[in-house]
Image (tube, rainbow, N blue to C red):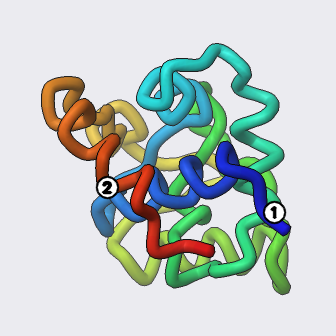
Amino acid sequence: MATDFQKSVWEALKLIPKGRVTTYGAIGRYLGTRAYRAVGSAVGKNPYAPEVPCHRVVPADGRLGNYSAEGGRDRKADLLRSEGVSVKEGKIVNFESLLFEFDKPTLRKKRNVISKSTIS
């Protein structure tokens, strides 16, 4: 059974647009926590991939990082490429320009959506 924290992380994943990537830290800041490893753990336990797009989350240095779903890192790269993200030698090309940061004023409004999550 998923925890409320995991559900919140999975809801945050749904806000990341196609063709963009974000970091574990950005999700943590959105959720008001510095527990970035816990965010990473929740991302890795996402049972709804790729519909809930955990493949769009990468480490802060722009490396591809891991992917827990079937196919591993190669599958993650393929999913990102299918959305227009270039991946070369295990890194996101033009990482800074593709980085999605959650809009803080919008997030406060979205918190109500997260608490009434459709993820169960």
Residue 64 marker? none
Q: Residue at x 56, y 27 (%)?
A: 28
Instruction: Using the rendered image of the protein, determine whether residue 90 is visible from the camera's viewpoint.
Output: no
Residue at coordinates 46% horizontally, 74% vertically from top-left?
Answer: 118
**Relative to residue 114, is residue 35 depicted above or below?**
above
Give how far across and how far down residue 90 sits, in percent: 70, 52
Quadrant including the C terminus: bottom right
50 lies above or below 97 = below
Q: Whole-percent x and y of residue 92?
A: 52, 48
In-front residue for pair 89/27: 27
- Please determine whether, in this image, residue 103 is positioned above or below residue 18: above
Mark 2 burial class by Cα count in 10 Å: few <14, some 14-19, many 20+: some
Q: Quadrant of the N terminus?
A: bottom right
Residue receiving disc 1: 45
Residue 50 appears left or right of 103 = right
- Is any part of residue 24 visible from this angle? yes
How many marks the image carries: the answer is 2
Q: Residue at x 41, y 52 (%)?
A: 114
First in residue order: circle 1 vs circle 2: 1
**Badge 1 element:** loop
Specify the quadrant of the image occupied by residue 86.
Answer: bottom left
